[in-house]
Amino acid sequence: MKILLLASGEFALPTLELLAGKRPELELLLFSQPDQKKGRGCRVAPTPARDKAIQLGLKSFTPAINTLETQEQIKNFAPDYLVVIDYGVRLSPRTIALARGAAINLHPSLLPAYRGPAPMPWALINGEPITGVTTQLVGERIDCGDILLQEPTFILDHETMPELSRRLSLMGATLVWRTLVGWSKGELSPSPQNERLASPAPKLKKEDGLIDWRASATTIFNRIRGLNPWPGTYTFHRGGRVKILAATVEGIGSGPGVET
């Protein structure tokens, strides 16, 4: 089996490690986003996925994915599967078609719920009791492909965004492997998404972090745990901006910011 993994962020790392551990029976190649300047010193650093690939001794490249030159490179590699996780770039139809078997995406929600770039934060902000991971066929519309497999899980009462992301990334790695094996054996039947159940998970903005103290304590708590570490939550006090890093819900009372 030959896999071209398109990945950039930390959410892809468990899948990258799982697939890399199955070499040499599995041939793996990573495409990631270009190295970027980070920190106060503006040091150029690879994406988390590419950094992990380097540690694992895995070949990795940072091409412009939809160019003719890159498409020719993919053709030469002749992957059975394109696996897309936290990559950051939309694939063109011509790029998608280069997978001999299928182009598969791992998404951290139970699609069609929370389509978009920030499904985990919005699930926490909205106080959802359940979320999960989905593998879907990559289509022309983002997060609208036919569903292959899903794995649900409860969101823990005090789970933060980093904690939920780590847990779903581990679940996702197992789900990706189950999907690859199932597809290769002809055991999976893609299922179209129900558009009536679709909901958005739009890109986060800094202003999303401003706390509205008129809301209930639970609503405020969910926004704090959903938006940290980025873009972070904050308020203004005595003319200054105050960052809010964490919170708990305690006490009994009534009115804004108080649980009853």
Image: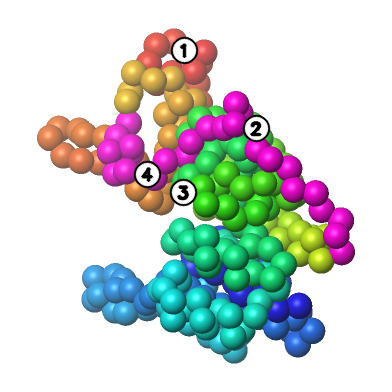
Give the class, few, some or many, for how many residues have Cα within 10 Å of label 2's Cα (few <14, many ≥20): few
In the drawing, what numbered circle is on residue 117? 3
**Label 1 vs label 4, nearer the camera:** 4
> Residue at position x 33%, y 38% from top?
209
Find residue 224 and report its image quarter.
Answer: top left
**Magenta region:** 185-211
Q: Is residue 172 left or right of residue 160?
A: right
Q: Which is the main secondary structure of the residues drawn in magenta?
A: loop
Residue 184 drawn at (x, y percent)? 81, 66
Taking depth in this image into account, of 72 and 150 the one nearest to the observer is 72
Indicate which disc, 3 or 1, sits on the residue closer to the N terminus.
3
Indicate which disc, 3 or 4, sits on the residue closer to the N terminus.
3
**Amino acid type assigned to the residue bearing label 3 in the image:** Pro
Residue 116 painted magenta: no
Residue 199 painted magenta: yes
Q: CA distance from mark 3 to mark 4?
A: 8 Å
Residue 58 drawn at (x, y percent)? 59, 86
> Residue at position x 50%, y 76% from top?
71
Q: CA distance from mark 1 to mark 4?
A: 32 Å
Question: Which residue is the site of mark 1?
Answer: 253
Q: Is residue 4 left or right of residue 25?
A: left
Taking depth in this image into account, of 107 and 161 the one nearest to the observer is 107
Q: CA distance from mark 4 to mark 2?
A: 25 Å
Quadrant location of the N terminus? bottom right
In the drawing, what numbered circle is on residue 194? 2
**Amino acid type assigned to the residue bearing label 2 in the image:** Asn
